Amino acid sequence: IRRQRQMCIREGVKQIPNRLKAALADNHKTSKWLADQLGKSDMTVSRWCTNRSQPSVHQLIKIANLLDVDVSELLNKTK
């Protein structure tokens, strides 16, 4: 049952547009650039951009500052 629940959660997450990925594209930046700026691995940022994991609130604030966007833009769904 736990495994089925995890799969359902993952399937649901895939349907949510990834705002971080969109914000990077809007700013003509790459996940590699973001990883370098934050001192994180490329794999970590890749996981954030594919919704396999999420950055901490502290990291979200840093990301918003680097991309010159409001934190809410990284949290709210696109229309």
Image: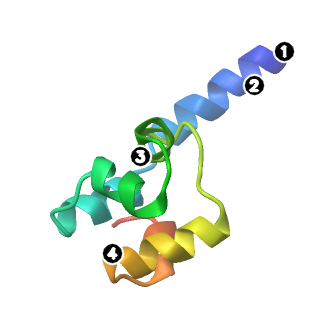
In the depicted structure, whether residue 72 falls above or below residue 24: below
Task: Say few, some or many: other residues with alpha carbon within 10 Å of mark 3 (under 14 / 14 to 19 / 20 or more).
Answer: many
Q: Secondary structure at mark 2?
A: helix
Q: Secondary structure at mark 3?
A: helix
Pick out the residue farthest to the left. Answer: 28
Distance from the alpha carbon under mark 2 to that under mark 1? 6 Å
Q: Nearer the viewer, residue 1 or 24?
A: 24
Distance from the alpha carbon under mark 3 to that under mark 1? 28 Å
Residue bearing the label numbered 4: 67
In the depicted structure, whether residue 56 falls above or below residue 46: below
Distance from the alpha carbon under mark 2 to that under mark 4? 34 Å
Q: Residue at x 76, y 16 (%)?
A: 3
Horizontal side of 35 relative to 54 (left or right) equals left
Q: Nearer the viewer, residue 32 or 54?
A: 32
Distance from the alpha carbon under mark 4 to that under mark 3? 14 Å
Inspect the image, locate mark 2, and give the three-letter code of the amino acid beneath it: Arg
The image position of residue 74, as x and y in percent, is 45, 69
Q: Secondary structure at mark 4?
A: helix
Asked whether disc 3 touches disc 1, contact meaning CB atoms under 8 Å apart, the reply is no
Q: Locate the N terminus and report the quarter of the image it occupies.
A: top right
Sequence-wise, the earlier of marks 2 and 3 is 2
Distance from the alpha carbon under mark 4 to that under mark 1? 40 Å
Sequence-wise, the earlier of marks 2 and 4 is 2
Q: Which-is-in-front pick, marks 4 and 3?
A: 4
Q: Which-is-in-front pick, marks 3 and 1?
A: 3
Residue bearing the label numbered 1: 1
Residue bearing the label numbered 2: 5
Inspect the image, locate mark 1, and give the three-letter code of the amino acid beneath it: Ile
Residue bearing the label numbered 3: 49
Q: Which-is-in-front pick, marks 4 and 1?
A: 4
